[in-house]
Image (cartoon, rainbow, N blue to C red):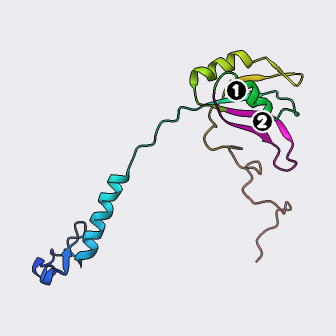
Amino acid sequence: MQRPIDLRRCYTHGVFAPHPYFPFECFPAAIIRLSELVQQSDKDNFRPKEESTVTNIFVGNLSYQATQADLQSAFGQFGNVERINVVTDRETGQPRGFAFVEMSDADAAQTAISNLNGAELHGRAMNVNEARPKPAGGGYGGQRNGGNRSGGGGGRGRGPRW
């Protein structure tokens, strides 16, 4: 077992100081002071994450001709609309028939949901409700190759090489 360092050696000329977490080592005093300052500034700059008051609304069964401007005018009559995201196909860029609308006021969002659910936009009845959060883990939930861990290929079942 190591013995704690001789503090007289650390404090010689005020150059070295014992490290608070490593009692068997001496470090330059400037480094110790710098690390203490960084820790204090981290505590000073820490602010808990503010709660988001935005209500996320799912809008389904949208006409492919519906635009952000159409949704802005429909939802804007009930309150402040923070953001609109009309979901498009990644490859073609065409709308996929649903969107997400974020409203800053929860009461206005509930009013918009109750009034716009079933309302027609470009000849289609919209399905409007509060968006549910994404399930954790996303996507497929398992292996894409049907559980076969071999990595594909082959199929003949060849034996060992040697």
Image point (77%, 51%), residue name: 145
Q: Write down the residue under mark 2.
A: 68
Where residue 121 sits: x, y (%)?
Answer: 84, 23
Q: Amino acid at mark 1?
A: Gly
Image point (65%, 17%), residue name: 111
**Which of the two residues, 78 or 110, is positioned nearer the viewer here?**
78
**Which of the two residues, 136 or 145, is positioned nearer the viewer here?**
136
Q: Is residue 82 magenta?
A: yes
Where residue 91 sits: x, y (%)?
Answer: 85, 50
In terms of image quadrants, where is residue 122? top right
Q: Earlier in the sequence, mark 1 or mark 2?
A: 2
Secondary structure mostly taken by the magenta-highlighted segment of the chain = strand
Where residue 149 sits: x, y (%)?
Answer: 72, 56
For numbered disc 1, what is the local secondary structure?
A: helix
Image point (64%, 37%), residue name: 134
Image point (70%, 26%), residue name: 76
Q: Which residues are magenta?
A: 80-101
Q: Is residue 138 left or right of residue 106?
A: right
Q: Is residue 41 magenta?
A: no
Q: Amino acid at mark 2?
A: Gln
In terms of image quadrants, where is residue 154? bottom right
Q: Is residue 4 left or right of residue 125?
A: left
Q: Residues within 10 Å of mark 1 (few under 14, many from 20)?
A: some
Nearer to us: label 1 or label 2:
1
Where residue 104 sits: x, y (%)?
Answer: 58, 30
In terms of image quadrants, where is residue 114? top right
Q: Quadrant of the N terminus?
A: bottom left
For numbered disc 2, what is the local secondary structure?
A: helix
Q: Is residue 154 left or right of residue 28?
A: right
Q: Write down the residue under mark 1.
A: 76
- Give how far apart the Cα atoms at labels 1 and 2 are: 11 Å
